Amino acid sequence: MGEFIVRLLMSSHYLADAGEDERELTRLNSLKEFHSAGRGYWSRVSEADWNDWHWQLRNRITTLEQLERLMPTLTPEERAGTVLANSKLALAITPYFFNLISKSDEDCPIRSQVIPRIEETNTAPWEMSDPCGEDAHSPVPGLVHRYPDRVLFLVTDRCAAYCRYCTRSRLVSNASGYDFHPEFDKQIDYIRRHPEVRDVLLSGGDPLLLSDEKLDHLLGKLREIPHVEFLRIGSRIPIFLPQRITPALCDMLKKHHPLFMSIHCNHPRELTSEVRAALARLADAGIPLGNQSVLLRNVNDDVTVMRALMQKLLLCRVKPYYLYQCDLIAGSAHLRASVRRGLEIMEAMRGHTTGYAVPQYVIDAPGGGGKVPINPEYVLSRNADRVVIRNFEGKIFEYPESADGSLLSPAPREIEEPELV
């Protein structure tokens, strides 16, 4: 009888696990569905206007009055944060992206990324206005030379919409009075005089807010420098404003290959049918696409959400590139998930989905130390004749090698069988 009860309990546990797995698979597949953002409040706007990126920019939500009219469910914390927003980081949301916000859910993962909250005014002693130390590595205005062979080229302080956890909130939108003025001639001259620079990343603000003509001119000037091997653009525009990714823009960009683009997407809901079409235009123009996500509390600090995001990016022909630990930007504590949670998510990704869907988890070392890869512990020990490692299932393996890294000769007579941790 006792054995029967044990078997029954084990069977019940298996069925519970199977049921849980099935529910998570259903949730995963639901998150990976593509939907249009729709028109919402702007249903009477003409097709031509709605698909015009200039119209989207002119009609952004930028004031408390607009926000309260469009979203009567604004909480006291959101209202107070919006009143004070322009002293830290301006409020701006494109009509297109606003339609992704749930008006009834205060914890909506889109809502918390772009609507200010009063918590932004709380600053911990360890938080900084320049957490990545960019200003200290800026030899000329608008250019950051932190790594040996590459530079960050800041082209503007404006974005289509403003993320509330923005690492450059001191600079973008000019709400804090930073008064950023890039000097393209000086930036380009610095690159020209430094032959070690082979990689230039255009960022800001958002470079795709420049007109096609201005962006073409800037890329062309950089392409004239012989030692610049390839160019990159960092942009949230494909997510905030897919209407900007026009055939004309793509035709212009492909003149400047090799040209890469890093987009910024944090939640699978952001990958709409409009975004998928915009990303397809970029991919068809031969532009390799990567994604940089930020680990955010109640946005993507969930294994199923993160897995759906990464798999859905691949469906859009975008390679997950980095998962950033949220920088120690002043006023961002309410949005930061823990490093411990980040490691748990990475543990649940590696080996459990295709390697193409697994980004590199990094912390941008506070104060300007650069990106530091953060991984679960897979190397358990090393000694004079072997490395002990574990796999995604928790099984232990030994890899024989000598102290200098060469293979042992002869190899050990016995290698232990793997076991579960």
Image: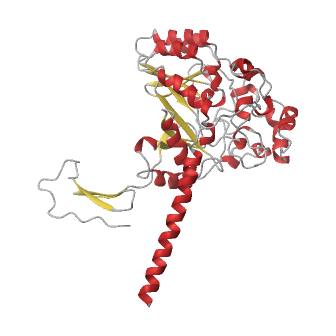
State the image coordinates of residue 132 (x, y, percent, origin top left). 58, 36
- The answer to whether residue 61 of the structure is visible from this angle is no
Please tell me which residue lies in front, 294 or 33. Answer: 33
Please tell me which residue lies in front, 343 or 350. Answer: 350
State the image coordinates of residue 191 (x, y, percent, origin top left). 49, 16
Of the 4 image quadrants, the one containing the N terminus is bottom left
91 relative to 418 in the view: left or right: right
Residue at screen point 21% across, 63% down: 415
In the image, residue 356 above or below residue 413: above
Image coloring type? secondary structure
Residue at screen point 83% across, 36% down: 70
In the image, residue 111 above or below residue 317: below
Residue at screen point 46% across, 75% down: 11
State the image coordinates of residue 136 (x, y, percent, origin top left). 58, 29
State the image coordinates of residue 34 (x, y, percent, origin top left). 59, 38
Please tell me which residue lies in front, 167 or 62. Answer: 62
254 relative to 27 in the view: left or right: left
- The answer to whether residue 371 of the structure is visible from this angle is yes
Of the 4 image quadrants, the one containing the C terminus is bottom left
